[in-house]
Image (spheres, rainbow, N blue to C red):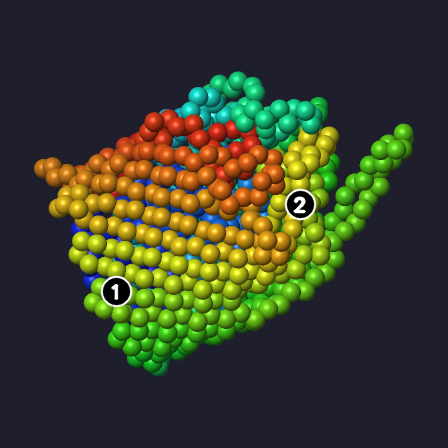
């Protein structure tokens, strides 16, 4: 169902720019990555792939974990669709990366509006759609193999995909895919970051059958990763952690190795999907998608004796999703959609950790009904939607309480949790209008909401992956967001410009703020963060421009600005992206036997985050920084086969810097120079 959505964003070809606007299409304000842009980002995480889009940043926890940020919002406010199924994992932490293999994607779409009506709660900040290749496209059998090698971390990534149709039965399609990645300790400009290795093994399979009136598809994938957590984020005493933060970089010297030891994470995510679509006649269609996901998260910390092999956190989240759509059209000017989304979840702490649970066991049931009406003419398109959601959340957990005054070392158990109900009505109104030959205006207003997550309500302990001690608030209420975003697009043969301006108000915005104290546990001492709630505003703009300067030289620039305020207290909000400019100059080359040859030089500027409350964090925001990169590549085509090679250098001048959105900036600098080589063969 979701894979059929299309985007209005117009992408540059290798040299020229397509200057023809499609007829009034999607009223969502979105951007699409595909083709060359995906090829040159192979081997990167989902967050790093998407950051080339204006308005998208990356929230990092060291070098091994990243997640996308859209207009200052992230985590449970960004709904991620993996092959049409909303991704449901243990995503409640800033250091919990999405369990998706970007190498499976044929294209990725980022929707920047508050799209709660169509996609459900938790789309308050936007939607990311990861869409694999169509299993019915092409004739016969084809595929690809690729390898990515990177010097920093001495990483190697290999991937392969094979797809096709059966001989004599073109209406039966299939696809298999897999990837493996191994990386060791990465290096900043002048020192190694201890325990930053990564192992990742992923695979998927899909099969489908279609008739004149129906189509059916089955899909399965597994994502599994083991990753190290920076040693420097874990300290033994209050004096030790204060010294680490004061130094701003590791006190110890680490060399290179591939070992991954505690603290570390081990995550395995299974996704199974079956879908069916029927043509009911009279321009009516019915579609059904069922998905099952099992997310198993283990986190390991420093422990004494034979407990080292025991996880400190061991969680299994089982999720069932059901999407039903009924669509009624009338020629090309009218479309009405009725739908239902249901989600049932059971989260279980596996016994045997011999540690307090960070979040409780819980059951969650969500149901939503929606209706969307679309009208369309030659030059404009109008869409209106209304939705109602209900959520039941039932939690039950316990903690061990140690009586420090009792010399016998007595231990008591504290039970916590309870049942909560959340419900809300949301709506959206959007319009797209072709102003002139090359101009289009899109406006989207959405009302969205999000119920609080388990960690925001009940956490009271060490968040091992983040190296933080977090305390939730059981009285936290649902967030309610109102977002108005407007886009002006200009497209001609030599110039493409898009300006997005937005304003968003969020009632009961949930966030963590540093407590500026430390909490000591049996495993060490950690900065203390508390969950708070306030009314907040987000105002900003994104500019994306591409132009052809000469016949073989093109220039691109992205600018992203966001301003966020705590309206209840008249303060700035913490952990909001700083102003950012990304630009590149590309020269296309022409050689016999080669195609799409190019050389590209890029530059990124990230300003210091000056919209910050002095004394509200353990360290002030880091200074502004400039990064430069280079890339060159070409394709060699032989009949239906194609070999592509590109090489690149990130952080060309080995700049020593810190990013405000890296949660480990307290203890270390970001990654230094990285030389990479990508080779892909398509057949």
- Tag on residue 530? 2
Which comes sooner in the sequence, label 2 or label 1? 1
> Measured from the top left, where is residue 435 in percent x and y?
26, 69
Mark 1 crowd level (few <14, some 14–19, many ≥20, 10 Å Cα)? some
- Spatial separation of the CA atoms under disc 2 and disc 1: 47 Å
Element at label 1: strand
Residue drawn at x 61%, y 46% as measured from the top left: 512
Regarding residue 189, the answer to whether it shows in the image is yes
Front residue of 322 and 608: 608
| Residue 637 occupies quadrant | top left
Residue drawn at x 48%, y 18% as measured from the top left: 255
Q: Is residue 656 above or below residue 581?
A: above
Residue drawn at x 59%, y 61% as measured from the top left: 507
Identify the residue under disc 1: 439
Front residue of 659 and 410: 659
Q: Quadrant of the C terminus?
A: top left
Mark 2 crowd level (few <14, some 14–19, many ≥20, 10 Å Cα)? some
> Measured from the top left, where is residue 317 in percent x and y?
60, 50
> Measured from the top left, where is residue 167 in percent x and y?
26, 55
Q: Residue furthest left?
A: 592
> Measured from the top left, where is residue 19 in percent x and y?
20, 59
Regarding residue 195, the answer to whether it shows in the image is no
Element at label 2: strand
Front residue of 275 and 64: 64
| Residue 440 occupies quadrant | bottom left
Q: Is residue 228 above or below residue 191?
A: below
Q: CB under 8 Å between callouts 2 and 1? A: no
């Amino acid at each position: 169902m979701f894979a059929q959505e299309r985007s209005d964003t117009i992408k540059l070809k290798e040299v020229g720019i397509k200057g023809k606007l499609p007829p009034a299409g999607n009223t969502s304000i979105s951007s699409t990555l595909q083709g060359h842009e995906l090829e040159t980002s192979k081997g990167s995480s989902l967050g790093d792939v998407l950051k080339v889009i204006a308005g998208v940043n990356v929230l990092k926890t060291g070098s091994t974990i990243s997640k996308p940020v859209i207009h200052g919002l992230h985590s449970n406010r960004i709904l991620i669709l993996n092959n049409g199924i909303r991704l449901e994992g243990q995503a409640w932490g800033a250091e919990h990366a999405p369990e998706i293999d970007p190498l499976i994607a044929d294209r990725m779409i980022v929707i920047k509006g508050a799209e709660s009506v169509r996609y459900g709660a938790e789309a308050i900040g936007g939607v990311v759609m990861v869409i694999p290749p169509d299993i019915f496209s092409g004739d016969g059998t084809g595929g690809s193999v690729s390898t990515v090698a990177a010097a920093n971390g001495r990483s190697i990534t290999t991937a392969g995909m094979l797809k096709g149709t059966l001989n004599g039965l073109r209406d039966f399609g299939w696809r298999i895919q897999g990837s493996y990645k191994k990386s060791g300790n990465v290096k900043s400009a002048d020192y190694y970051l201890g325990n930053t290795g990564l192992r990742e093994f992923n695979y998927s399979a899909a099969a489908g059958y279609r008739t004149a009136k129906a189509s059916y598809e089955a899909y399965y994938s597994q994502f599994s990763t083991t990753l190290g957590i920076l040693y420097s984020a874990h300290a033994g005493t209050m004096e030790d952690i204060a010294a680490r933060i004061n130094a701003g970089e590791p006190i110890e010297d680490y060399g290179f190795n591939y070992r991954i030891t505690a603290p570390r994470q081990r995550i395995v995510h299974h996704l199974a999907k079956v879908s069916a679509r029927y043509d009911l006649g009279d321009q009516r269609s019915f579609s059904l998608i069922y998905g099952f996901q099992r997310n198993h998260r283990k986190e390991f910390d420093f422990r004494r004796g034979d407990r080292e092999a025991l996880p400190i956190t061991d969680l299994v989240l089982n999720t069932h999703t059901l999407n039903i759509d009924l669509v009624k059209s009338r020629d090309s000017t009218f479309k009405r959609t009725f739908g239902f989304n249901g989600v049932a979840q059971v989260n279980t702490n596996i016994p045997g950790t011999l540690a307090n649970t960070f979040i409780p066991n819980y059951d969650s049931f969500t149901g939503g009904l929606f209706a969307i009406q679309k009208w369309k003419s030659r030059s404009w398109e109008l869409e209106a939607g209304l939705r109602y959601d209900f959520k039941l959340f039932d939690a039950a957990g316990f903690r061990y309480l140690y009586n420090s005054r009792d010399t016998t070392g007595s231990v008591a158990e504290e039970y916590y949790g309870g049942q909560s109900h959340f419900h809300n009505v949301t709506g959206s109104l959007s319009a797209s209008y072709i102003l002139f030959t090359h101009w289009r205006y899109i406006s989207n207003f959405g009302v969205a909401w999000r119920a609080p997550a388990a960690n925001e309500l009940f956490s009271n302990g060490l968040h091992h992956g983040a190296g933080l001690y977090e305390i939730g608030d059981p009285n936290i209420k649902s967030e309610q967001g109102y977002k108005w975003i407007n886009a002006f697009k200009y497209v001609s043969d030599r110039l493409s410009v898009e300006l997005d301006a937005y304003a968003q108000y969020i009632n009961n915005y949930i966030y963590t703020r540093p407590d500026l104290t430390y909490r000591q546990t049996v495993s060490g001492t950690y900065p203390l963060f508390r969950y708070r709630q306030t009314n907040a505003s987000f105002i900003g703009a994104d500019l994306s421009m591409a132009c052809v300067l000469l016949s073989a030289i093109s220039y691109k620039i992205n600018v992203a600005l966001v301003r966020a305020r705590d309206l209840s207290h008249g303060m700035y909000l913490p952990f909001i992206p700083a102003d950012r400019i990304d630009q590149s100059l590309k020269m296309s080359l022409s050689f016999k036997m080669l195609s799409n040859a190019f050389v590209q030089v890029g530059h990124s500027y990230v300003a210091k985050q000056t919209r910050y409350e002095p004394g509200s964090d353990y360290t002030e925001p880091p200074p502004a920084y400039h990064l430069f990169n280079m890339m060159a590549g070409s394709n060699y085509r032989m009949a239906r086969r194609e070999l592509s090679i590109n090489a690149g250098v990130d952080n060309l001048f080995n700049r020593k810097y810190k990013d405000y959105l890296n949660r480990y900036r307290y203890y270390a600098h970001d990654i230094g120079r990285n030389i990479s080589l990508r080779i892909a063969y398509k057949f």
